[in-house]
Structures are given as structure tokens and as C-alpha cells.
Amino acid sequence: MRNLLLLFVCTCTLYLHGQNAAPVIDYYPPTLVPDRIITTWKTDPATSFAVTWRTSISIPKGIGQIALANAGPDLDSIKASEAKTELLVTDLNVAHFHSVNFTGLKPATLYAYRVGDGTVWSEWVHFRTAAAKEAPFSFIYFGDAQNDLKSKWSRAIRQAYSHMPQADFMLHAGDLINVAQRDHEWGEWFYAGGWIYQNMPSILTPGNHEYPRSGGSVVLTKHWRPSFTLPENGPAGLEESAYYTDYQGTRVISINSTAYLYFDQDSVSQMQWLNNVLKNNPNKWTVVTMHHPVYSPAGDRDSPSLRNGLKTLFDKYNVDVILQGHDHTYARGGNKPSTWRNSD
């Protein structure tokens, strides 16, 4: 894209024999100190940003503080917001997840924020709001982190950040982890990204590995919504997994392709919603992220229902970029009409 700079990073590895077993020891337990801190957008990126974090259940409430970032070390006119707090029971622990959506902010302005409970705080972190109008920007795109998160995903995200420390946000195309309900894997995902998540916001879409299969049912992992604060402007029942964010003249749309493929009602509702979101798009550019590819670069995979449904809308409304994951391969293609052939 002419006004868009991206860094593409994909990490995908296989577990060695014996490494796929769930750990018995909780290596990433919740404590009094805020951890798993991550910034996202729930509402307008020019005038708001959201922060989500975790503590032990001995911390009953959360507070976010924000102030303009001064040139000096001191902060003036600090404002506080009470967090929304929810309980999450995992396979290893019980924790409180807290979230604050800072609103009423000035566009293109550097702020400092911290989170805590009024006594125990995180460090102060800087965050810059988006411009209120069309402007060039850059972001880092990640494919499936998924496996060996502490040893390999850490290297990918840290090297990407080192290469583009001034990128405006990160985009994660699903399969953040391998086994959706294992808190240990979520602990490794957050450990690997560390403080990068705190000052470079993330746009995230779920993959099939965020949908555990249990007792014949397939539902989005219970970690997803407590861990991330995302827009709720998508179809009913798919809040914070199918949504859109308008950023400096570009509409970034997350499609929940797993729900689309698994459930007929979710494919219908997303098609109707997507048509409206694309039809009534005031932005110059459109970027779509979804986990499953329209055209698979892996020879043994194909998703005709995505092409027969979603691609018709992509072509109709001239979507500029579609960023996908799932296949653990690199590929690049255009959105010109073409005939699908499942290659050898």
C-alpha cells in the first residue's frame, strides 16, 4: 500500500516428542503486581486506547492512571479510571483480569499511563494516540506464533520490534498459542512480548487454535475476552473477535474465519455485517485480517467457502490488503480475479 509500511513476521515450529505435555507447575502465576499488560483499541484510536492486565484475586479492583507525557520526569494532572474486573479460572490458577478504556484524549499526543490497584502499580508507560485524519503509518504483521513461544516467538517479536520500534501497532493473525485453554502457553505468549505489548498496541484475530474442542463443543477460548479489550462493533455473539478499527484513513477489519467455517449462522452474520462495513467505509484504504486464507499456499488445504463467500465482497469493494495465517508458509498474491487450482 502506498501509505502503508508493514513488516511481515511468521513463526511456526513443531513440538518435539514429549514437549506437548501440559506443565504441572504454574511458572507464570498471578501476583499482586500487574502483569500480562497489553494495549489495544476498543474505540477511536485518535481519542482513546485500552489497557488490559492481570493480578491475583487478592487484588479485588483495578485502576488506570493517565497524564500527558511531559518533557521532564514529573507528571501533572493525573486522571484515574476505575477498571472493569473479571474472574478467570484456568487449568493452573485463578486470576483477576482488569481493563480500562481511556477516552476523551487528544489526537496525535503522547501520554503516560500506569495500572494497578491504588497501592501496587505497574511502571509508567508512554503511548501515542493516532492522528484524527488520514496520515501515513506502519505496522508489524505476525502470522501464527503458536508453538515454542518462550524460546522462538520471543526472538521473532523482539527482533521485529528492534527493526521497527516506531511502528504504530502490531497485527496478529490468529493462533497465538497452540492449546487454547492452557494458561502456561498464554503465560509464555505474554512473557515473550513483555513490555512491547504495553506501548505498541495490538490488533488480534482468533485462529482455530483459539477454539478448543471439548465434549463435542467448539467455543472461543475463555482466555480471549478477559485478556484483550477490543471493539464490540461486530455481529452479535462475535464481539471482540469480528470487529473493525479505523486508523488514520484505513479501516482494519478482523474476520473470525474459524467461526465462519465452523458455524453456518456465524458465516451468514459475518457476511451481512462485512457487506455493511465495506459498503459504508469512509476510509481511503481497507485492510482485512483473518486466520484462514482465501487461497491457501499449502498444497493440501483449501477453503472454498471462504472464496465463494468472502472473496466476492473483497472484490466488490476493492479491499486493498488481506493478511492471513494458518498455513505456516510465506506467500504473496494480488486480489485480481483468478481461477483457483490446488497445486501440488
Image: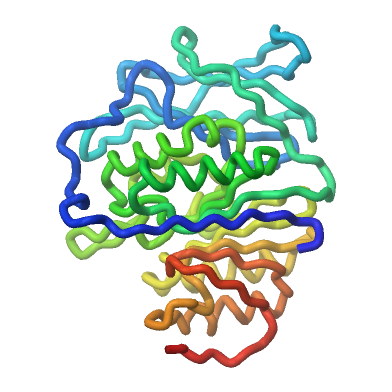
Q: Residue at x 63, y 54 (%)?
A: 7
Query: How many numbered markers are drawn?
Result: 0
x and y, in percent, of residue 315 in the image: 68, 79
x and y, in percent, of residue 149 in the image: 37, 46
Q: Between 116 and 17, which is closer to the camera in this rendering?
A: 17
Is residue 211 visible in the rendered image? The answer is yes
Q: Can you say which quadrant of the picture contains the N terminus?
A: bottom right
**Quadrant housing residue 272:** bottom right
**Quadrant housing residue 215:** bottom left
In-image side of 171 versus 282 (left or right): left
Q: Between 195 and 225, which is closer to the camera in this rendering?
A: 195
Q: Residue at x 80, y 59 (%)?
A: 282
Is 41 located above or below residue 300 in the figure?
above
Q: Between 252 and 1, which is closer to the camera in this rendering?
A: 1
x and y, in percent, of residue 287 in the image: 67, 62
Q: Between 41 and 124, which is closer to the camera in this rendering?
A: 124
Q: Can you say which quadrant of the picture contains the C terminus?
A: bottom left
Is residue 237 visible in the rendered image? The answer is no
Q: Residue at x 81, y 42 (%)?
A: 132
x and y, in percent, of residue 160 in the image: 57, 46
